Image (cartoon, rainbow, N blue to C red):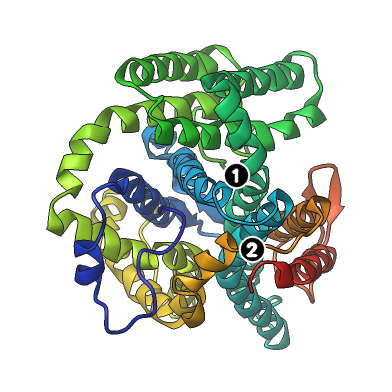
Amino acid sequence: MTGGNTVDRADSVSIADVAAATPSTRDRWADALRVGSLLVVIIGHWFMVAVTADGEISNALKLIPALQPVTWVLQVMPLFFLVGGVAHAHTLDRLTSAPGTSRGRYAAFVTSRADRLLRPTLAFLAVWVVLGVIAHVTGLTSGGQSRLVIAALVMVPQLLWFVGIYLGIAAFAPAMYRAHHRHGLVVLIALIVAAVAVDWARFGAGSGLLGNLNFALVWLALHQAGFAWRDGHLTTKVAVAMVVAGAVGLVAAVTLGPYPTSMVGLPGDEISNMAPPTAALLAQGIALIGLAALARPLMARVLARPRPWRLVMTSGAFAMTAFLWHLTALLATLLTARVLGLHLPEVGTAAWWWSRPLWFLALVIPTAALVAVFLRFDLPPAAGRGGQAAGILTESRTWVDPLGVVAVLVTVFGILMVSIAGVDLLGNRPQFFLVGEVTPAVSFGGLAVGLLLLRVCRPARFR
């Protein structure tokens, strides 16, 4: 389904063969949304990241405020969580009919989601920890390029917020799917109301700390929409209502409320629509999902053709790996340009605009090289082609549910802390996380505990 790569390690099977063998019942539009959302994020980051004359990393949207409304369309993370709900519903349906106890199936589900996400993530972190050590040993963190290097050691791992949040949402997926079967769209509506209420308490009643609840509520709501998508609840009428309500809510939020115009976080802004996610972001996501639902019949016909579907399959094979490594390619290119004394055009000038296609082309080359090296960590193990899914479905051993939940949640908080504190272990500079400051050393310690707990759970997943 849509939750993983679209190809495996079978060298004798080409993408064209896999595409041709795709069953007619597959939701190809959901697959395309997954791939497309990751690629839009990559291009968006390449467009937005800028370095000022004094070596500070900034954002083109901050320097050109008139561009910020573009994020109302190009903030596509809601679509990825939507597709996550579709994929998880598919997996949970199969698990429900599989032999074994419900507890064994739950532990298998949550730990398999963690395993799928953590293989490429840990490879990414291992490389960046080494890069941080090298930067210190060679003096790059104290030399002429120190600002850019230190910023890179903190900024690049920020991508991992998505991995942490997505894994946390996956841990709730079985319970939320059962609630969906019992109450349908009422659950989605309840999550939306709860998220708006949290924002009211945050901004209206001054309970700022309470706003962190929306890290769960907003992404759970968008993920819940994936269940409704798969069950056919997002009819044309419902989709139109989502577009209208979401668009009106978004415009009202940014014009009448305290929310910034940009749907991505910008440096220096007191409020971000992403951290924690706000009702404005939720409204934007609901409208975007409604548009995707309206386009579904047309896109299903387009993707039924061999060429468009092969394009989706080809892109899907490397999209997640490219997502993890595209900022590494960007920062390496920026640092190389500064070391060589190359002056990039000032953001917003005519030269900057005209150079964007060339800039993107220049970034594709190192990104492709990194994908070629690290794609292996994003592919299922050779023994797991079909066996991995079968191992999940034929699980018969019983593991206590709380162990799987605790293992995943500790891992989630470890990943989120690393995404905030960065990988500069030798510098070990503290960063603010939720309620207080954490250092890279503490963050990696939390992640290590989570991984150890997952290791304890691992024998129960596969025969």
According to the image, label 2 marks what residue?
A: 395
Specify whether residue 56 is in view. no
Residue drawn where x is 54% and y is 17% of the image? 253
In the image, residue 20 lies at what x, y percent?
19, 63
- Name above or below for residue 448 compared with residue 305: below
Residue drawn where x is 68% and y is 77% of the image? 129
Res. 396 image quadrant: bottom right
Label 1, residues with CA under 10 Å away: few <14, some 14-19, many ≥20: few
- Name above or below for residue 259 compared with residue 323: above
311 left or right of 254 in image: left
In the image, residue 256 lies at what x, y percent?
55, 11
Q: Do the residues labelled 2 and 1 touch (CB within 8 Å)?
A: no
Secondary structure beneath disc 2? loop
Q: What residue type is labelled 2?
A: Glu
Name the outermost residue toward the bottom.
138
Q: Quadrant of the N terminus?
A: bottom left
Residue drawn where x is 82% and y is 56% of the image? 403
According to the image, label 1 marks what residue?
A: 267
Q: What residue type is labelled 1?
A: Pro
Secondary structure beneath disc 1? loop
Residue drawn where x is 59% and y is 72% of the image? 119
**How much space separates mark 2 and mark 1, taking CA atoms?**
47 Å
Look at discs 2 and 1 and give the one toward the viewer.
Answer: 2
Label 2, residues with CA under 10 Å away: few <14, some 14-19, many ≥20: many
In the image, residue 35 lies at what x, y percent?
36, 54
N-terminal of the pair, mark 2 or mark 1, is 1
Foreground pick, 68 / 101: 101
In the image, residue 48 lies at what x, y percent?
43, 50
Foreground pick, 148 / 375: 375
- Name above or below for residue 291 compared with residue 87: above
Specify whether residue 354 is in view. yes
